Amino acid sequence: MIGKLTLYFEYPFVRYALIVGVLIALCSSLLGVTLVLKRFSFIGDGLSHVAFGMIAIASVLNLTNSMALVLPGTVVCAVLLLRTGQNTKIKGDAAIAVISVGALAIGYLLMNLFSTSTNLAGDVCSTLFGSTSILTLKEGEVWLCAVLSVIVVALFIFFYNRFFAVTFDESFAKATGTNVNLYNLLIAIIIAVIIVLAMNLVGSLLISALVIFPALSAMRVFKSFLSVTICSAVFSVTCAFLGILISILAGTPVGSTIVAIDILGFILFWIIGSIRE
């Protein structure tokens, strides 16, 4: 097995997949703790469906660089989702359902009506589940992911205290002079960027797993915000790394394999937490 892995590591696409997978797992785990504690974890699921719709539009327009449309479009929808979720007439979960289901349906409709691909089912499956796209990354895409990941991690570290305050008590944070709306907006934009990056890793239907499972697993063992965040990051990176390696060796879909490892890790942490209690 070691010899087989050594042989695979000689191929650039394997190294690219590992680098991008680890970076995406790290970024999603950091903001995942905040989203879970704010009971807004399914925003990742909603935005992933929006990204799917944007990818469908980009494919219909035959754009050579779909990221130029997908990233800003998803960010705009994240802002709209945040604003709509604060509306007293449309609660957060209803806003997510309306935007995500609508974007998913319209995206699939456009792909059926205007797509010129000879393998529409395969393209849709790859977009939804990230079956092979992580193994076809180009060097430019890797650099883009690296730059955006560094920006996300830097923003999280720089605004850590603000995110902490907004996560646990928005009323107190507002009373102390913190611009709660601004930091909620920043969180939504960062999540949108992470969602777009994660599309190639696990697909649009499995992105929520990268956000939810590491945070929930860490919460089973640790109690403080800092320790949960660090544990969540280590957990997510480890599961992503193992999942990519197993998928390459066993020939299984990358996204599904990573999520399966996340589930096994959650069960292990749940057992550890139960024993400690």
Image (tube, grey):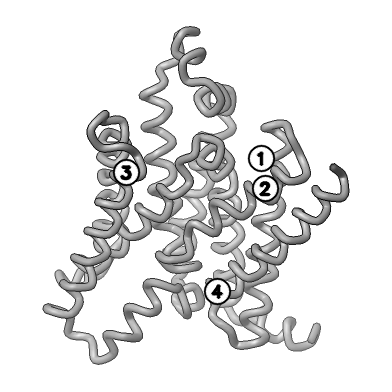
Q: Which residue is mark 4?
A: 256
Label 2 vs 4, first from the N-terminus: 2
Label 4: few (<14), some or many (≥20) within 10 Å? many
**Dot 4: element:** helix
**Dot 2: element:** helix
State the residue lying farthest toward the left.
Answer: 113
Q: Which residue is mark 2?
A: 232
Q: Is residue 71 above or below residue 253?
A: above
The residue depicted at 41 percent of the width and 30 percent of the height is 184
The residue depicted at 70 percent of the width and 86 percent of the height is 7
Q: Is residue 168 above or below residue 66?
A: above
- As drawn, the label of residue 80 is none
Q: Is residue 263 above or below residue 253?
A: above
Amino acid type of the residue that numbered disc 4 sits on in the rendered structure: Ser
Q: CA distance from mark 4 to mark 3?
A: 25 Å
Q: Which of the 4 image quarters holds residue 243?
A: bottom right
Q: Looking at the image, can residue 252 be seen?
A: yes
Q: Of 144 and 76, which appears nearest the observer? A: 76
**Dot 3: element:** helix
Q: Which residue is mark 1?
A: 229
The residue depicted at 68 percent of the width and 63 percent of the height is 239
State the residue lying farthest toward the right.
Answer: 275
Q: CA distance from mark 1 to mark 4?
A: 24 Å
**Dot 1: element:** helix
Label 2: few (<14), some or many (≥20) within 10 Å? many
- As drawn, the label of residue 78 is 3
Amino acid type of the residue that numbered disc 3 sits on in the rendered structure: Ala
The residue depicted at 65 percent of the width and 56 percent of the height is 236
Q: Looking at the image, can residue 140 be seen?
A: no
User: Is the C-beta separation of discs 1 and 2 under 8 Å?
Assistant: yes
